[in-house]
Amino acid sequence: MEVGRQFLAKKALFSFLGGTFRIFDTSGALQFFVKQKAFKLKEELNVFADEGQTQKRLTIKARSWADFSSAYDVTDATDGTAVGACKREGLKSMFRDSWLVLGQGDAVIGKCEEDSMLMAMLRRMIFKNWLPQRFTVKDAGGTKLGSIRQRFNPFQLSYDVDFSGGNNSALDSRLGIALVVLLLAIEGRQG
């Protein structure tokens, strides 16, 4: 499953019992669709290529029922192969959202981190939905691979995603999509 490197990711404005996420390419064509089920103790997100949910592309499944510091395994649904995982750094994320991107054997191959501690604290304590989040994605060596920037809209969560920086082969595009879906699903609950 090879995909582009730039996207617009949106959480549906209104969703009854669970979230709905859409990821569009730069021309506005739908690339991925996720319908999050409500009231699941152990999170499982299925990523589809279509809104009819007929072409399953990825499965993102929590290893444990608590998402405070949980790892989420990413599996390619077309052939069943393990792609890697994304792990929320729970304690760190209380002050500044931080995710590890894990490869085979849970080796850290990258990191996604909210911009600055000061901005993160202002967001949490004062400005809430009025100060958009910004994330930088880097490989294990610290080279910038991309960015995920929240658009200013206090009513609908949406991100401009750009993974075209740095070494394009350093981040499997499927892990990039999984990371964006998790930001919409997990970090999106905080707003």
Image: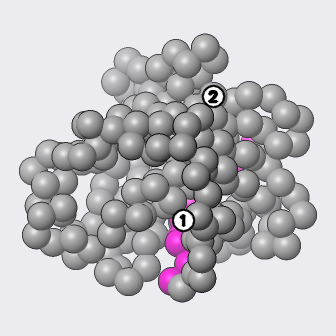
Residue at 24% from the left image edge and 46% from the top image edge: 94
Q: Is residue 6 magenta?
A: yes
Left or right of 48 on screen, residue 64? left
Across and down, in percent, residue 181 comes to 56, 55
Name the quadrant of the C terminus. Answer: bottom left
Name the quadrant of the N terminus. Answer: top right
- Asked whether residue 94 appears in the rendered view, the answer is yes
Q: Amino acid at mark 1?
A: Ala
Q: Which residues are magenta?
A: 2-13
Q: Is residue 129 above or below residue 117?
A: below
Q: Is residue 189 above or below residue 114?
A: below
Across and down, in percent, residue 126 comes to 10, 69
Q: Secondary structure at mark 2?
A: strand
Q: Within the image, what quadrant is residue 131 found in?
A: bottom left
Q: Within the image, what quadrant is residue 153 found in?
A: bottom left
Q: Residues within 10 Å of mark 1 (few under 14, many from 20)?
A: many
Q: Is residue 66 magenta?
A: no
Dot 1 or dot 2: first in sequence order is 1
Please name the residue that numbered disc 2 is placed on: 84
Q: Amino acid at mark 2?
A: Gly
Q: Secondary structure at mark 1?
A: strand
Left or right of 118 on screen, residue 64? right
Across and down, in percent, residue 90 comes to 33, 38
Nearest to the eye among marks 1 and 2: give it: 2
**How far apart are labels 1 and 2 at the CA level?**
21 Å
Residue at 19% from the left image edge and 46% from the top image edge: 95
Q: Residues within 10 Å of mark 2 (few under 14, many from 20)?
A: many
Closest to the observer, 63 or 46 = 63
Please name the residue that numbered disc 1 is placed on: 9
Residue at 58% from the left image edge and 81% from the top image edge: 15
